[in-house]
Amino acid sequence: GEAKFFRANSVFILYKLFNNIYVTTEPTTPETVQKVITGKSGETEIFDLVKNDLAFAIANLPLKTSEAGRVTQNMARHLKAEVALWQKDWQEAKTQAEAVINSGAHSLLSSTGLVFKGDLNHTETLWALQFKVLINGGANKINFNLMPNYAELMPGSKYTVEQGGRGFG
C-alpha cells in the first residue's frame, strides 16, 4: 500500500509540474535501460495509474499507525481527493474528504496556533515528514534543500531559525 501511494504521489506531482511525462509499470532491466523514450503518456493513462494505485493503497493501508510519519489510508484518501479536484470530479473529491473527516482518526485542534507549534504529530495531521535533530551524529540539514537562499536575493537577510534557517536554494 505504501509503495503504491508513493508511486501515485510521485506520478501526480510530476504530471502537475511537467504535464509531458512518460509513465510505465514495466521494470527497467539491463536490456531496456538504454531504451529511448519518445512521446509522452496520455492523460487518461496517467490518471488511471494514479487512481488505481490509490485505490490499492486505500484498500491495503491501515486507518491508523503507531509509527509517526507512516502513510495511512487517510493520506491516500486525501491524495485521491486532490487528484479528483485536479480532474474536476467534485463528487469523488467530496466522497474522499468526507471519508477522512468521518473516519474518527483525526480531529481539529482547539486553536489554529497549535497546528505548527512544536511536534507536528497531532490529531490534525494526516501526514508529516519526520526529521530528527541529529542524524549520524550531525545536525539535520533537510531545511537546506527546502528553504531558498534569501541572502542572494535580498541583501541584509539573516539566517535564523525564526526565518527558516539557511537554504541552498
Image (tube, helix red, strand yellow):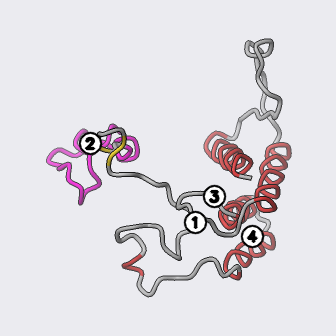
Q: Is residue 140 above or below residue 91?
A: above
Secondary structure under tag 2 reads helix
Residue that label 4 marks = 93
Determine contact: label 4, label 3, CB under 8 Å.
no
Which residue sits at x=75%, y=71%?
A: 96
Amino acid type, callout 3: Val
Determine contact: label 1, label 3, CB under 8 Å.
no
Residue that label 3 marks = 71
Q: Dot 4: few (<14), some (14–19), or many (≥20) neighbours within 10 Å?
A: many
Amino acid type, callout 1: Ser
Which residue is more in the foreground, 77 or 154? 77
Q: Is residue 125 above or below residue 46?
A: below
Which residue sits at x=64%, y=42%?
A: 14
- Frontmost of labels 1 and 3 is 1
Q: Earlier in the sequence, mark 2 or mark 1?
A: 1
- Frontmost of labels 2 and 1 is 1
Q: Earlier in the sequence, mark 2 or mark 4?
A: 4
Disc 1/disc 3 C-alpha distance (Å): 11 Å
